[in-house]
Amino acid sequence: MKDKSLISINDYSKDEMLRVLDLAAEFEQNPSRDILSGKVIATLFFEPSTRTRLSFESAVNRLGGKIIGFSDSASSSATKGESLKDTIKTVCNYSDLIVMRHPIEGSARYASEVASVPIINAGDGANQHPTQTLLDLYSIRKTQEKLEDLNLFIVGDLKYGRTVHSLLMAMAHFNATFYFISPKELRIPAEYKMHLDHLNLKYHEYTDFRDIAGEADIIYMTRVQKERFSDPIEYEKTKNAYVLRNAMLQETRSNLKVLHPLPRVNEISTDVDDSEKAYYFTQALNGVYTRQAIISLILGLNN
Ligand code: CP
C-alpha cells in the first residue's frame, strides 16, 4: 500500500481493506500522534465537500502534518484554463500526497498517471469514492461485529451514487446479500449486477422497501445526486422517491443500523436522528480514523 495511489476500491485487496480497518481502530483509541511531522498533504477539491475534505484535514492535523490546497476550483488557476495535468504536476512539487475530488469520472486515475506523489481519490464524478467505502466498512464492522453474510439494503440513487458503486464492490468480498431499492430511472447500472453475477452473489431489486425492511442488517440511504442530472425534470421526478421515517424502523432487526454517506436532503426524516438505529453522524466521525489509517499506510508511517 506504501506509495500506491488509491483511486478505486478495487485497488485494495480484501486483506488490504481489513488492514485499513484494523489500523483505523487503533487511531480511534489514540487519534492524536505526531507521525506526520514534516509532511505536507494537498487537498484539491474541484467539487464541494464538507465531510471528506474536513475529515481528511482533521486527520492530518491530528497527526501533526500540514495541509495546503483549495476547497473551490474557482480560487485555483483552473479558472484561467490550466489543465488538470499541469495543476497536478505543480502540486506534486509542494506536497507528499494529494487528495483530490473532481467532477469528471476517470480524472483521479488520470491524475495518478501524471503525478510523482500518490493520489487519493476523494470522489470522481459518479464513479468511485473509495475512502468513503473504507469508512463505511469500518462502520458496518463496528456496529455488526462482522462484515460477512449481511443483508445490505442500498436505497436511493444507485445510478449516480459513487459511494454505492464503491461499497458494492467492497461488500462483494464479504458475501453480502444486496437489496437494491431505487426508482426505475436510478437503478444500479448493469455492469455492477454483472460483477455480482460473476461472483454468484445474491441481489434483489425493488422500488419500495417498506414491507421488507425487517430483513435488513444495514440500510444505506443515499441522496439523489442532483448535480449529475442533465435533465432537471428527471431530478424533480425522483428527488423525493424515499423518505425513511422513524415509524418504519419499529419492526426492524435489533442489530439494524441506518447509514448515509451524507449530506442528506430529505431522504432521512429528522425523527430518525435520535433512534439508536441511526448511525450516520458517527459514521462521518469514523472518517477521521479511517483516513488517518489510509494516509499513514500510503506514506509508510504506520509503525
Ligand atoms: N460523504 C461525502 O462525500 O460527503 P461530502 O460531500 O460532504 O464530502
Image: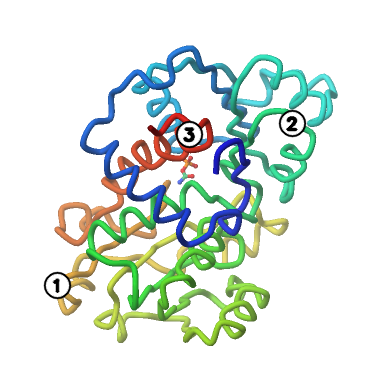
**Quadrant of image for the C terminus:** top left
Q: Residues within 10 Å of mark 3 (few under 14, many from 20)?
A: many
Name the foreground residue: 239 vs 194: 194
Q: Nearer the viewer, residue 86 or 114?
A: 114
Q: Which label's residue is closer to the chain start, 2 or 1? A: 2
Question: Horizontal and vertical percent for residue 253?
Answer: 18, 76
Instruction: Please name which of the two marks, 2 or 1, marks the residue nearer to the observer.
Output: 2
Q: What residue is disc 3 on?
A: 295
The secondary structure type at the circle numbered 1 is loop
Q: Residue at x 49, y 32 (%)?
A: 300
Amino acid type of the residue that numbered disc 3 sits on in the rendered structure: Ile
Residue 234 in picture, x, y percent from top left: 64, 65
Residue at (20, 77) in percent of width and height: 252
In this figure, which residue is indicated by the disc labeled 2? Answer: 115
Crowding at mark 1 (Cα within 10 Å: few <14, some 14-19, many 20+): few
**Left or right, 227 with reference to 148:** right
Quarter of image, res 24: top left
Please, which residue is most extreme toward the front here?
A: 303
Give the CA distance from mark 2 to mark 3.
17 Å
Disc on res. 246: none
C-alpha distance separating marks 3 and 1: 35 Å
**Quadrant occupied by the N terminus:** top right
